[in-house]
Amino acid sequence: MFRRTGCAVLLTLGVILGGEQAAGADTLVDNDRTAGSYTRYDGGTDATLQGCSTGRRSQNEPSVAVDPRNSDVVVAGSNDYCAEIGSGSGNQWPGYYRSTDGGANWRSSLVPGYPNDTSPLGSQSATKGSCASAGDPTQAFDGGGRLYYGFICFNRAKPTNGSIYVARYDEDGASYRFTTRVERGTPSVAGLFQDKINITADQRNGNVYVAWARFSGNTGNDVILFSRSTDGGQTYSKPTRISDGGASEQFADLAVGPDGAVYLTYRIYAGKKSSDAIALVKSTDAGRSFTRPRTVAAITGFESTDYGPDTCGDGPFRCSLLNYARFSSLSAVAADAKGVHVVWNGRNGTGQSKVFVRNSSDGLSWTGPIVQLDATPTGHQFFPDIASDGSTLSVIFQDSRSDPAYSPDRPMGNTAAGTSSGPVVDAVLARSSNGTTWTETLASAARSNPNFENRGNARSPFFGDYNYVSAAPDGSFFTVWTDTRDLVSFTDPRNGNQDEGFDADTRTCNWVPDDIFAAAYSSPAVSDPCLSQGGLDQNIYGTGG
């Protein structure tokens, strides 16, 4: 089986430090280059899925779940921009990918309810008529073969209506059942936008737990909300606020301990009444109530806005000599018989972004040491996630220690001259039996450039906001990350920067992919066939053991 042999062939980080990149044991999760590779939940097809099958569009923000009762079954998700081909809207939709051989081979689909989905169950989805673009995928199995797939759904044009939804699949993720709206957003500009969802399930009693950030328009009071389902995802409780508020709070992450305790960690941003920190709350009554927030650690955040705007690209999106996607410090949590384990990334004393872990016996006392996963002095580490199989912890993150132009004063992949240093980001897996001593291996077989401008037909980079790892009680695990190895690139002669897309001089495209000057900027239509030639081909890769 692929996953159980994968550990033996993961690469040691000596390969990275030596500056060479050898082949690893990863696999492509989304197959968008073969006719018929995307199929509907019922085995049928339509114009959207036909376009997805060969569209070679962007996928990012991956999620993954290993089935605890059959670890040969692995499901994954992503923001899948192939949905724009059928709708012509420039929107993305949650991709759904399923493997029955431990991650060696995958079947691709979209969560039903996407624009132009006229199938019987797709037409009945709670998303229909309310929203046209969806993403932020998150997934979890319960112990009975039910897979819960959480996502947000919204409109890019007004009314935005950013709301929280959860789809349910039965038969170990093989059979789609329905989609439920958990919480509704409001259409006004200063209204409520529900965002950045995370989901988990108690494998003993089947309870489903959902947490997310509620953005309150221009008030700046962004808080963490929580809801639960005790009837298999058919209904969810009225959302309750579990954070203090008064600051920007984002990136909720959930875990259930072996005794049924629920743990929820999140990031607090510095504000008038707050400092940068990682917080955690605990519930011992199946999510009915939570403790007051405990501070896991004060941090120095690693933010794309440290270098300028949220993201920096070309044409009208050009903002400096730099070119970079959005990134931020975030946290994740795992719980097992040994305790509660929280991982996050943040800057150390030299300004380098590192991955840290702190362990607690009960999730209430956080007095133990903060552990840095490694002592490598160069490169930024970001987007960590953590899972436990009951005896071993697994952490996935991305790392630019191979960047020859690394500086704490610049984002990944940028030289001092304002050009690209190329594909410099690896996916790295760290594992530990105690939460304090960690062994790192190289998960990805090729490096990525996170600064490619491949988000739909826009000209700004997007690498997503997170990676994902899942583990099963039998010791199996699988991890996924965003990867740009398949993207067709070229060097823009106007700025010397390795950029997104494909050279119009060598392909059949008649539009200019980007330009230094906004006045000369042009962008292709969503329907332009040039977009399917590899210039947007960001993918999801994964590996396991």
Image (spheres, rainbow, N blue to C red):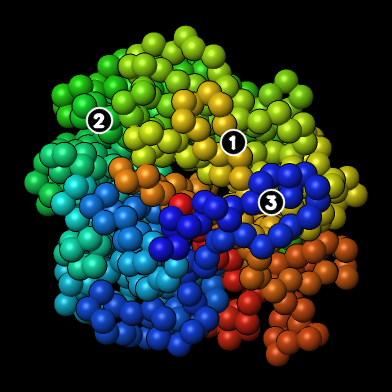
Q: Residues within 10 Å of mark 1 (few under 14, many from 20)?
A: some
- Vertical placement of 545 versus 518: above or below? above
Q: Measuring 56% from the left and 26% from the top, which residue is drawn there?
A: 437
Residue 262 vs residue 348: left or right? left
- Vertical placement of 298 versus 385: above or below? above
- Vertical placement of 128 versus 464: above or below? below
**The label number, if any, that marks residue 425 in the structure image:** 3
Mark 1 or mark 3, which has the lower sequence index? Answer: 3
Q: Which residue type carries mark 1?
A: Thr
The Cα atoms of the two marked residues, 1 and 2, are separated by: 25 Å
Q: Tell me residue 104's x, y (percent).
A: 44, 67
Q: Nearer the viewer, mark 1 or mark 2?
A: 1
Question: In the image shown, does 189 or 527 lie closer to the viewer?
Answer: 527
Secondary element at image label 1: strand
Q: Is residue 340 visible?
A: yes
Secondary element at image label 2: loop
Q: Nearer the viewer, mark 2 or mark 3?
A: 2
Q: Tell me residue 173's x, y (percent).
A: 25, 62
Secondary element at image label 3: loop
Q: Which residue type carries mark 2?
A: Pro
Residue 53 vs residue 112: left or right? right
Q: Measuring 52% from the left and 37% from the top, which residue is drawn there?
A: 431
Q: Nearer the viewer, mark 1 or mark 3?
A: 1
Q: Measuring 45% from the left and 81% from the top, which residue is drawn there?
A: 53
The Cα atoms of the two marked residues, 2 and 3, are separated by: 35 Å
The residue singled out by tag 2 in the image is 258
The residue singled out by tag 1 in the image is 439
Q: Residues within 10 Å of mark 3 (few under 14, many from 20)?
A: many
Q: Tell me residue 299's x, y (percent).
A: 58, 21
Q: Which residue type carries mark 3?
A: Val
